Amino acid sequence: MNDLEGLMPEQIQRISKTRERVIDSIGKNLDLYGITLSIGHLYGYMYFNQGPITLDELSQTMGMSKTSMSTGVRTLLDLKMIDKVWGKGNRKDLFEVTPDWHQNFSDYFSIKWRKAVEGNMNALAKSLIEIKDMKTEYNEDIQFNELLSTDENKIEEAIKYYRWLLKLIEALENGTIFDLIPKEG
């Protein structure tokens, strides 16, 4: 059911304008995090929708192709910002927003950061192995070994940072971050 049914045209226009301002703000905010403006607007629209919605309904309402809509929905699903839900008597897939913005933030950053940390840790580990090999190969070259030791120390400091970042990611994933910084009311 459309939540605007039964309202006067002036009321519909005013609430629509208010919602559009928030939807645009959500889109711009998510754009800062690397999510396209259109997918941000999609999330914003779904946020105000009263209940689950199909791709066809989204496409029609937002004036986007079903392919673009599908890509946007898939992105939001991957980021855990929306859920695929079951609707009795409905054969089409239904989607609805996960309304907990704290959890959306936690999921988004933990997914992105974990992927980045894993890639960076692999690169650092590989470089450490190469440095140790070079130290063995050039063990007589004092100047070169000092340089290698300096690089090794820098890489080990970076690894410490990434271990710390993994703890932050875990705190986001398991919710203990909210023990340190509680959600408001």
Image (cartoon, helix red, strand yellow):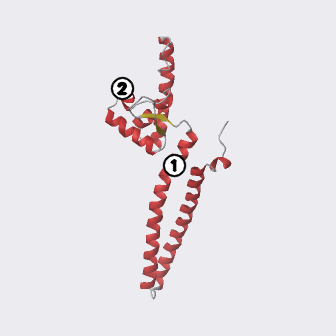
Q: Is residue 174 left or right of residue 37?
A: right
Displayed quadrant of residue 31: top left
Displayed quadrant of residue 74: top left
Amino acid marked by disc 1: Phe
- Which residue is depicted at the point 60% across and 53% down? 171
Residue assigned mark 2? 60
Q: Are marks 2 and 1 in contact (CB under 8 Å)?
A: no
Query: Which numbered dot is residue 109?
Result: 1
User: Where does the C terminus fall, quadrant-wise?
Assistant: top right
Query: Which numbered dot is residue 136?
Result: none
Label 1 residue SS: helix
Label 2 residue SS: helix
- Which residue is depicted at the point 41% across and 85% down? 137
Query: What x and y, as percent, mark residue 170?
Result: 57, 55
Whether residue 24 is visible here, answered yes or no, is no
Vertical side of 97 occupied by 139: above or below: below
Vertical side of 62 occupied by 153: above or below: below
- Which residue is depicted at the point 49% across and 18% down? 4
Amino acid marked by disc 2: Gln
Mark 1 packing: few (<14 Cα in 10 Å), some, or many (20+)? some
Mark 2 packing: few (<14 Cα in 10 Å), some, or many (20+)? few
Query: What x and y, as percent, mark residue 112?
Result: 47, 51
Mark found first going from the N terminus, 2 or 1? 2
Whether residue 130 is visible here, answered yes or no, is yes
Query: What x and y, as percent, mark residue 162?
Result: 53, 61
Q: Which residue occupies the foreground of this view, 88 or 74?
A: 88
Nearer to us: label 2 or label 1: 2
Spatial CA span between label 2 and label 1: 31 Å
Q: Is residue 171 left or right of residue 8?
A: right
